Amino acid sequence: MVILAFSVFAFGSTSYWARTLLMGGIAALFASWWLCTARSRPPVEFEPESRSRGVEIAGVRLRRSGLGVVAAAFGGIVCLQLVPLPRVVRGWLSPGRAALEVPLEAVLGESAAPEAGPSWAPLSLDASGTVDALLLLLAYGALFVLVFNLADSRERLVRICRSVALLGASVAVVGLFQDLSGAERIYGFWTPRYGGSPYGPFVNHNHFAGYMELTIPVAVGLLLRRIFRGSAPPRAIAAAPPSGPGSAARRMLEVAPAVRGERAGQAVLLGLAVGVMVAALLLCLSRGGLASLVVAAAAVLALLALGGRLGRWEVAALGAVLALGVTLFLWIGPGPALAHFRRAELLQNEPSFLGRASVWRATLSLFLDFPVLGSGFGTFPAAFLHYYPAGTERIWLQAHNDYVQLLAETGLAGAAVAAVGLALLLAHLLRPLILGPPVRERFLYFGLVTGILSLLVHSLVDFNLQIPANATLFVVLCALALAHRSLLARGERPAAEG
């Protein structure tokens, strides 16, 4: 949690120093966990019938998520981009590379021949940038393995999710304080080097919205879990009627007054946290963030309805949460936000949709010149210099579409592997929404899946996955969701809450 907090409050970890400390912290945490686990008992105890889903490496027993092979294949493609290859092979794999090498050599005066270029060179146009991106990718992988294996019980999983919700509420408070005070600098003293539209600790308000997209559903899931599950004593649970929304409400009324009071207090705090985050999301003026969260929530609700697991109590609770956020938004002052949504095309600190579309077309041109293995993972700022749309007045360090940028940087090979990994992830996460057995306490799982889907949708028009803070939290939520799915599949009895 210290690493997660550092990643977001250090300006989203977009600076080199913050990104380096983030990777170092993840590496140190993973190494210490691995050494301690190897010297003590394994973190995950596999049942005899489920041993095939575990693997033991150097005395540490790890869960299998089904994504390890895909991640290794993608990492292999990135490593291949760093291998020096002869000029002929580079020309076959990347037809547009020669056109970029010749002008550079002509400027340097080394050679003027059309076939000029190093005899041996890597496919990546910026090897150092690819190495940095690969190291960050390895850090994400280590973090995923760590969280996926640590969340081996519902009690531990809920504890991590509570910390994520608290962190999201803290970031929202920072954003609201900056908004209401009229501060134009981050924390009141730091001005972004390349400008932007700061909100909270982020340089861009869209990235703040991306962080809220991840944390709001988690907090809502905890809130619904608290309302419908409660801390009923074991006897009350054992004597309760069959599972279902109605029976959950009746059990709430049968619990002792002291327990009901504790549950009500926690529900109020969670509701307040959700309201603050929803208000911050509305006030940060991110159309893409708000639309992505709505689309993801609608998709999850539709899947639940398709599987017959959406009851009136859940719908009423979600409506109450939304009403709380909207009420707080209206109380703070909706004037600037409503004006922004009405006249979005006049906003000068955010690229318009037409501008982004032109960059997407130019990025596809970059892909056509590097079709097989791409220009190099993490090389978009350097590679795109030759493909700027005519008449543009902006500096484009990202393509504002994570999928198009990934296609340009890793080519068909990397995009195909990434598509397979995304399909496997969605298959793992969405299946329980429709076909899973009816198990209590699924609300937190619904929240985790909603947050993941929301950021994936937002990635169509922005680059949240290029922001280390958002990508780090996204990886953590993916690991928690897959761990929660494993707990639901095993039918583990819920642990008592503190």
Image (tube, helix red, strand yellow):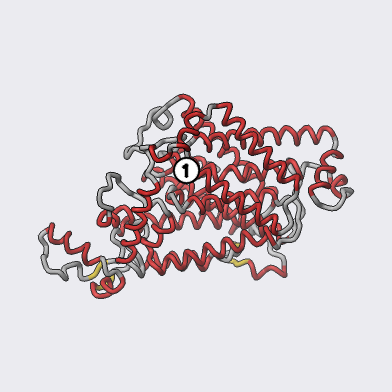
Q: Which residue is mark 1?
A: 7
Residue 28 visible in the shown view: no
Categorize mark 1 by other alpha carbons within 10 Å: few (<14), some (14-19), many (20+).
many
Given the current orientation, which residue lies at the most extreme top position? 181
Q: Position of residue 105 (x, y in %)?
A: 15, 61
Check the picture and name the quadrant holding the N terminus.
top right
Q: Is residue 238 left or right of residue 128?
A: right
The front one of 411 and 64 is 411
Q: Position of residue 170 (x, y in %)?
A: 55, 34
The front one of 165 and 276 is 276
Q: Position of residue 27 (x, y in %)?
A: 47, 52
Residue 396 higher or lower than 138, as above or below: above
Check the picture and name the quadrant holding the C terminus.
top right
The residue that appears at 42% across and 27% down in the rendered structure is 183
Callout count: 1
Residue 308 higher or lower than 93, as above or below: above
Q: Secondary structure at mark 1?
A: helix
Residue 286 visible in the shown view: yes
Given the current orientation, which residue lies at the most extreme right position? 239
The amino acid type found where label 1 is placed reads Ser
The residue that appears at 37% across and 53% down in the rendered structure is 357
The quadrant where residue 345 appears: top left
Q: Is residue 225 left or right of residue 36?
A: right
The quadrant where residue 382 appears: bottom left
Q: Position of residue 282 (x, y in %)?
A: 53, 36
The residue that appears at 89% across and 48% down in the rendered structure is 239
Q: Is residue 161 left or right of residue 398?
A: right
